[in-house]
Amino acid sequence: MARIVMKFGGTSVGDIDRIKNVANRVKREVEAGNQVAVVLSAMSGVTNQLVAWCNQMAKLPDPREYDTVVATGEQVTIGLLAIGLQELGLEARSWCGWQIPIRSNGVHGKARIESINTDRMSAAMAAGQVAVVAGFQAVGPDERISTLGRGGSDTSAVALAAALGADRCDIYTDVDGIYTTDPRIVTKARKLQRITYEEMLELASVGAKVLQTRSVEMAMKHRVRVQVLSSFEDKPGTLVCDEDEIVEKELVSGIAYSRDETKVTLTRVPDRPGVAASIFGPLADASVNVDMIVQNVSEDGRFTDLTFTVSHTDLERAREVLNGAQSTLGFERLTDDPDVVKVSVIGVGMRSHAGIAQKMFQTLALEGINIQVISTSEIKISVLIAEKYTELALRALHTAYGLDAA
């Protein structure tokens, strides 16, 4: 007997027929002799509607009441699924975040999970009951409902799997696994059977949308084996697991891209100790996340041009902070370019093989694609290029690293 956490996203529970389909999948898992907890998102589009209603009531809604409203979407789906499972002859009950309880910090709208007490749920599951859990929600120190932010249901599922000591967390979505790159752009992309936590974390952080970054971080921390599967097809998925579980490691596992990048350049910044801190400190204080950074020092060493990237949504705030401090910082001009894309090559094989970066740069050069910014980690190389070259770059790199499906 295994203990399994099954998570279904918004498209998987988008209407009554799809919720009934989920109920049948859960029944198969129970009939296989497994203890099952199911974590659900709200129906597709419902959370957006709830958020819109809050924003129509006030420009800046009270975060506590905002959470009270947006958490209701998941309560609808868990109740409906519990009813559906009971109709199939299974014992099932729904659990809201506060009933378990899932405890979070006091940051409403983007809370972080601090603890989960699964004693009552574990006992119910051991007695044969299916636990149907509301994703995305918890209870704060003020005993008010809190929500975990966008993609929070994935985080709920992985955290619950860790707390329950589950053998696996199966995440059902509208794709049938994790591919070497976006199959909508590169038709020769192939599905990976297994991928390491580190590789999945890098893929998620640079644009791959299959799993939410926080959920992968939690899975890696607690060594929760996560499987990505299709809600609509009975096909093998992709297992996200420890590196030790993968016998033959790929040199490069995947190529990701992110269009949510804007390049910002500050020209003729005085080149003195502490200048970077004086620029990036205020940006951090304003919750502007800076990604790639490159610095060019002038020939006489007195000035530097500083280029970095921020998300599109952070651009206006970054402009406001930097222009407001221009007299103090001493730069000449701020320019920005939103027509860029970040392309990243990822693989644990990079640790033990040389020449990965050279192949990337050479491939892009042969296609006439200019690299504007470069950043690296132990298992990732990212470059910033003009957005118009996205598809060409992905296809060329996918072929260059031998990732094309046979």
Image (cartoon, grey):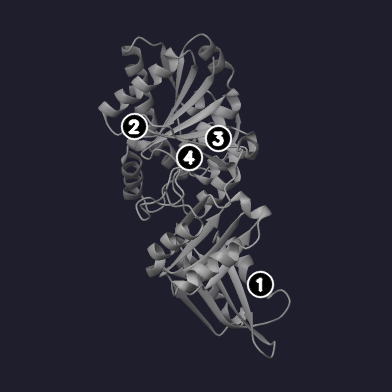
* SS at mark 4 in the image: helix
Secondary element type, mark 2: loop
Determine the residue positioned at 55% across, 85% down. 332
Which residue is denoted by mark 3 in the rendering?
140
Residue 202: horizontal and vertical position, in percent?
Answer: 56, 51
Residue 276 is tagged as: 1
Q: Nearer the viewer, residue 285 or 300?
A: 300
**Whole-percent x and y of residue 87?**
31, 13
Callouts 1 and 2 close, C-beta under 8 Å = no
Rendering quarter of residue 368: bottom left
Q: Please tell me whether mark 1 or mark 2 is closer to you in this view.
A: 2
**Residue at which label 2 appears:** 233
User: In 3D space, how far apart are the residues under numbered discs 2 and 4 (Cα atoms)?
Assistant: 24 Å
Q: Is residue 41 left or right of residue 97?
A: left
Which residue lies at the image location 51% right of the left edge and 8% below the top edge?
127
Q: Amino acid at mark 3?
A: Gly
User: Marks 1/4: CA distance?
Assistant: 33 Å
Q: CA distance from mark 4 to mark 3?
A: 15 Å
Q: Which residue is mark 4?
A: 152
Going by the numbered disc 1, the residue's amino acid type is Ala
Q: Nearer the viewer, residue 202 or 263?
A: 202
Residue 139 appears anywhere in the view: no
Q: Nearer the viewer, mark 3 or mark 2?
A: 2
The span from disc 3 to disc 2 (Cα, nearest Å) is 38 Å
Residue type marked 4? Gly
